[in-house]
Amino acid sequence: QHPDPQSISNTSGFPNHDKHPDAHWDNHADRIPEPVAKPIGDCFRHGGTMRGQTAGGPAGGTHRNEQPGVAMDLTILIPCCNEVDNVALLANELMPVVEQLRQDRTVEIIFVDDGSSDGTGDALAERFGSDPLVRIVRHKRNRGLGAALRTGFRYARGAVIVTTDSDATYPFPLITDLLDRLEPGIDIVTASCYHPCGGIENVPSYRVFLSKGASLLYRALVDRRVHTYTCLFRAYRRTVITATPFAADGFLAVTEILVRAMWNGYRTAELPCILRSRRHGQSKAKIVRTILAHLRFQSVLLRSRIAGSLAPAQAAGAGDTDETAALHVIEEVHS
């Protein structure tokens, strides 16, 4: 049970702001293994809720869509780059979850093939071509995780948008747990391996060092009660995405979206989870570039706290000025 939003104070460390007035997406898409969350007592029920001032309020429940003009209850957005080895895993482990979710809501899947050179896009089309609610968007060249998310958000039609990795480092059945946690009064649910009830198994130490170190700094700069700021596995209400522009094209985008949404007053809850190493392929993160990007953004946040104002993100990241040239093909993959 949540307090009345008018009776609670902003606890993010940032001043209160309205949603960015120029934030919007051109949503014209119609034209063109076992869960490992730890539901241990209060850890699961109360862990990591960020109680900041709401900006416009939540969009309602997480099942049937009641938003005018929104075509789907749920979009599952999956960025892919050279993930051909994980296509079978997606078919075998994601699709049973999707079929279960489709029993009481409409669910679409959007794959963004970010310039893969190993045939990922073709393999996805072959595997999922019989499903009319699976779409593949391809970038001509690799443009980065943030750019892939930006493209996927543009074509998403769901009242709720779940973003996830293609490699099941967080098992796909946990999508249901994300949605259950997205209760009234919560706008974002993020998986959290650094929550006291979360954990890490067999992940390379350099990745843990980078991710956990970054999250510790963001906890100091943004909100200490949110433990993990670097996880892609999340559920967002559509209103969060439409009101939260972000500039980063790379891995920083995952953090930037969360931080800017919290700045705008959206409420964030954590789902304690265990992060496991990927079974196929290698991480696409460029370590030095990612570290530098986080350091630059953290310096911006530090200056913003001092100045009392966070500069708005550019409407699109670098290289996004010609969207038509960037997109190779948009496939409605169905027979």
Image (spheres, grey):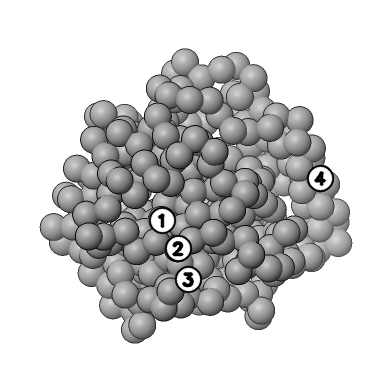
Q: x and y percent of residue 286 in the render? A: 68, 32
> Label 4 near label 2: C-beta < 8 Å?
no
Q: Nearer the viewer, mark 3 or mark 2?
A: 2
Q: Which residue is mark 2?
A: 330
Q: Secondary structure at mark 2?
A: strand
Q: Nearer the viewer, mark 2 or mark 4?
A: 2
Q: Which residue is mark 1?
A: 136
- For the residue pair 282 and 165, the one nearer the viewer reads as 282
Q: CA distance from mark 1 to mark 4?
A: 33 Å
First in sequence: mark 1 vs mark 4: 1
> Label 1 near label 2: C-beta < 8 Å?
yes
Which quadrant of the figure contains the C terminus? bottom left
Q: Is residue 126 left or right of residue 283?
A: left
Q: CA distance from mark 3 to mark 4?
A: 27 Å
Q: CA distance from mark 1 to mark 3?
A: 23 Å
| Label of residue 239 in the image | 3
Is any atom of residue 76 visible in this view?
Answer: yes
Residue at 64%, 19% (x, y): give it: 206
- For the residue pair 235 and 11, the one nearer the viewer reads as 235
